[in-house]
Image (cartoon, grey):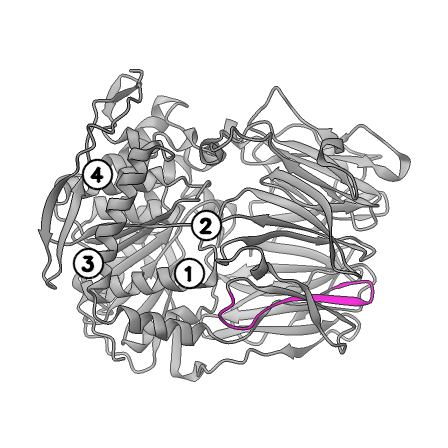
Amino acid sequence: MKRFLFFAFSLLLVLSISFHSIAQGIRVQYPKTVKVSHTDTYFGTTIADPYRWLEKDDSPETAKWVEEQNKVTFEYLEKIPYRQKVKERLEKLFNYPKYSSPFRRGDNYIFFKNDGLQNQSVAYIQKGLEGKSEVLLDPNTFSTDGTSRLGAFSISKDGKYLAYGISQGGSDWQTYYVMEVASKKVLPDTIEWVKVSGLSWQAEGFYYSRYDAPEKGKELSSKNENHKVYYHKVGTEQSQDELIYQDKDNPQRFHFAATTEDEKFLILSISDRGKGKRGDALFFRNLSKGEKGFTPIIAEVGDDSFDLIDNVGDKFLIETNRNAPNNKVILFDPKNPDEKNWKEVLPEREQPLNSVSSAGGKLFATYLKDVTSRVSVYDLTGKLENEVELPSIGTVGGFGGDREDKFVFYTFTSFTFAPTIYRYDIATKKTTLFRAPEIDFKATDYETKQVFYPSKDGTKVPMFIIHKKGLKLDGNNPVLLYGYGGFSINLLPGFNPLLIPIFEQGGVYVVANLRGGNEYGEKWHEAGRGLNKQKVFDDFISAAEFLIKEKYTSSEKLAIQGGSNGGLLIGAVINQRPDLFKVAIPQVGVMDMLRFQKFTIGWNWIPEYGSSEQDEANFKNLYAYSPLHNLKETKYPATLVTTADHDDRVVPAHSFKYAATLQEKNQGTNPVLIRVNVKSGHGASSTSKRIEETADIYSFIFYNLGVTPNY
């Protein structure tokens, strides 16, 4: 591999200008980015990387490049005549109170509420369900611009203390603080450099995970290695925290620690995704006996996952996919640890087990049937007691609680059903409405269809199609097609008020449940993982072809969108079928598939993608679809790439290099722009930034689809 030395490019980075005009009339002038001579060699194949210098995100040269690109992008967006009207409409639609389900600590209930357009949701506390609520913690006070977000949030079992995390400007790094709940006094405790961590109380302190402090100013380029578990006692300095676990020999392992509800056991979970392992190992420590060592439940990290639900006395209820692609629940007895002695409490079913929680001495299991929720209630031995009757077809979340709880809360939603909170009484098995949203939205004006279309290899793939009633299938409707397809993540039905402007303009919103997700269990995930990744792109392309064939739309009216792994999806499919789409929105995408493992937490994705350094088969597979490496001189859709300066998960270098190359290669007149959000991360860091970004995306889509909003 040729070694690359980063020289000072300040004298070389003279940005020349290239000109493109588009049919709508806005003339685009964007910088032609300076190229350098750099190559890498993989298994005998030499590959140029002329924009390698853009990986140096903290350099003045990269900062200048971002400034110039944003200038071009926002000059373009500002010329769209209805951009401000779109933003105002989004603000109006989003401006209604939004609540979370409450949870109990002692006699108090805690919930989150956003009045409408608050940048961050506020935590409230009240005595009982009928008491007067008061502010417990307001994240809007964390920063003057509203971009500092609340991360971890955990109240001690006795309700005495609240520990919470703050992330700055969208970063994944968090700093933990401690509040005394009764007085709402923030204590001096300050815990820094927390990342990929839980927060679990035991007695007068809590367990958390952190990395060593990165070099000053190098947070975005930190390798994120040597993850350690500590115990912090309230009222002490972080330097006094007790080191609970580390593994110097395996620097890319994740280590999580959590206590059981009774605080009798400490559970340690270990994963090793940097080595391509998809599962985890599991250990326990009996805190009630003062143990210092850990006893294995699963001693070695493999490809099977194990997640503790609760302890039943000295035994453990564990959710796992060991010999069960759709997941099951087993009871583990430390006195008889051999796998042959595991008792199946909830055997694997035909429908994948999406989540399971315990409360009030019951197990609440949520299964997926054709990408919609079904909830079953069991006793702790696995005896089915009843099914929870849900309001309609959609998605459910919640059902968590403590052992002595008499009722639990859950939230139900669908594409046209705003999140609504229900109370489920455990003894009577009855559901009652607890809190309905206060929103001006007529669900009866809309319809949702679920179709199963054939992919390239004949596999039937589910897809949701949502639009206002009375839609004419004349091939002329603007359509926004969304996809993800990876990491075993499901795209379930859910309400988003920011989609309403799409429908108001006669548009259609479509969600394709591509392989790579977990909609049909681990087999569905496996079918789109690693060497099978091309099937995900085939699924998405087939979704677009289906929509055109069925006359929902045409290539000239079809926009596509995806974020993170979904940004990779968008980049890959417009390389493979640039003729099929009119507009593309790849957001915070993984675009350099040969080097993703080099940045921050990127090595964590090796089990999903493979690695270019792993073996020749994986290199060839990644190289074949990598969005950055498969751009060619052709006509591309109108493309708006989005990223953020504080994204330390998918670092912005992915989007920088991709956008520079796309601008260089595009032979058509469609605009190719990059929008770099400031003080934001892998997701929008505040409500205002979310609305601003959405307004720009919709304006770009409408303008390039030839849609003029009627407001």
For badge 4, the amino acid type reads Thr
Quadrant of the image occupied by residue 377: bottom right
Quadrant (top left, top right, bottom left, bottom right) of the C terminus: bottom left
For badge 2, the amino acid type reads Gly
Front of the two marks 2 and 4: 4
Q: How far, Cα to Cα, is label 1 from label 3?
A: 24 Å
Front of the two marks 2 and 1: 1
Whether the residues at callouts 2 and 1 have beta carbons within 8 Å, the answer is: no
The answer to which of marks 1 and 4 sits earlier in the sequence is: 4
Give SS at disc 4: helix
- Label placed on residue 582: 3
The answer to which of marks 3 and 2 sits earlier in the sequence is: 2
Front of the two marks 1 and 3: 1
Whether the residues at callouts 2 and 4 have beta carbons within 8 Å, the answer is: no
For badge 1, the amino acid type reads Arg
Magenta stretch: residue 105 in it?
Answer: yes
Whether the residues at callouts 3 and 2 have beta carbons within 8 Å, the answer is: no
Q: Main secondary structure of the magenta part?
A: strand
- For label 4, the residue is 661
Q: How far, Cα to Cα, is label 2 from label 1?
A: 25 Å
Residue 662 place in picture, x, y as percent: 20, 42
For badge 3, the amino acid type reads Lys
Quadrant (top left, top right, bottom left, bottom right) of the N terminus: top left
Side (left or right) of 615 relative to 136: left
- For label 1, the residue is 690
Quadrant of the image occupied by residue 545: bottom left
Part of the protein shown in magenta = 104-118
The answer to which of marks 4 and 3 sits earlier in the sequence is: 3
Mark 2 crowdedness (10 Å alpha carbons): few <14, some 14-19, many ≥20: many
Magenta stretch: residue 695 in it?
Answer: no
